Amino acid sequence: MRSDNHGKNNEKDQAEAVRAVDSARRAFAKVGVVAPVLMTLSSKTVLGATYHCTLSGMQSGNHSGAHDWTSPCGVGYSPGGWCENADKVGPGSSDGRLAQWLDAGVVPFTTQLVTEVKTVEQKCFKTSSSPLRYSLKERTVTNTTTTTGGVAGTPVNVTSSWTTLQSNMTSCSKAVDKVTTTEKKYILKHGVPVENVEVYDAIYKAPPMGGKVATPFFDSSLGTMWDVLDDNRGGLIFHAIADYLNAKLYEAGKATSFASVYSVVTSSDIVNLYKLGAGGISFTSSSGTLIDANFNLASYPNDSLSKRVQYYLEMLHH
């Protein structure tokens, strides 16, 4: 830490500059803007990653006064990209598309297949004997089976009331006896039907099926990872999930354009960072550094631990 007033003022100016950049990035993330930026290398690097982007660099607070704190760390996808493009398919789609979720090993949505089997019946009813009269009536029997996560639920049968098609007939003949039709509906994202069967099939065939599985961030009762991403825009977990997906994509060898920071900040590190910010835990990083409540303190001495972790996570994926 510097002892001269000039150094203190410089650190204060740097912190204020980063706050402004962080605010702008949050605004971009909320509207789904994906803005990959090339990393600016400083004189201190670890395995090719800029020193301030590493966990050890942020924990130690050993930062050069000449360092540009507004420099991004990696060419990762933004939270907005991961959130808004999760149901996009096909080559050339936007960053954070469905195929990249699956490459990262995460199924973004809970999937449901709703199968409706409808049987239409017609029947002649004698309404009078003298004079002899008939009515032609019809009803529909619907059998619905909902399959979630590959497991079929109990079928639900609904039988409609008989409706009159013709009445006061001297004779009656049915146009049909029974006609059965089957309709399948594909459901994703908060119960919204999906027209694109390719999206459904891609998720349906991906292991683990259905997306609503235990995650490193939260109890699965809250929904899928996409659900939590969408429901917590701009918060700590919003940025943690994006960095986790970026790291998983890098680790799977599917993100060759990303900066090398993800070689020293792993997906397990991101999970532990989230837990640090959410609950104040301490942990040892994958590179062997003890990370505790002093994380990012040199840059943001007046902010809470949760905010300091969030600011780092935001910087990491830009």
Image: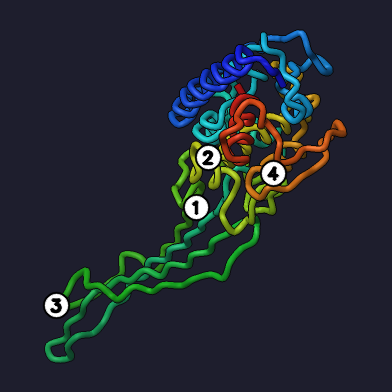
**Colour pattern:** rainbow
Label 2 close to label 4 by CB (< 8 Å): no
Q: Residues within 10 Å of mark 4 (few under 14, many from 20)?
A: many
17 lies left or right of 136: right
Among all residues in the image, which is located at the extreme right?
288
SS category of the residue bearing label 3:
strand
Quadrant of residue 1 in the image? top right
Cα separation, mark 4 vs mark 3, equals: 78 Å
SS category of the residue bearing label 4:
helix
Q: Quadrant of the C terminus?
A: top right
Q: Nearer the viewer, mark 3 or mark 1?
A: 1
Q: Nearer the viewer, mark 4 or mark 1?
A: 4
Which one is in front, 199 or 317?
317
Q: Nearer the viewer, mark 3 or mark 2?
A: 2
Cα separation, mark 3 vs mark 1, equals: 38 Å
Q: Residues within 10 Å of mark 2 (few under 14, many from 20)?
A: some
Between discs 2 and 4, the one toward the N terminus: 2
**Total number of numbered labels?**
4
| Residue at point 61%, 63% (across, down) | 152
Cα separation, mark 2 vs mark 4, equals: 14 Å
Q: Amino acid at mark 3?
A: Asn
| Residue at point 26%, 81% (across, down) | 125
**Residue 267 vertical placement versus 315 (above, below):** below
Q: Which residue is mark 3?
A: 168
Between discs 3 and 2, the one toward the N terminus: 3
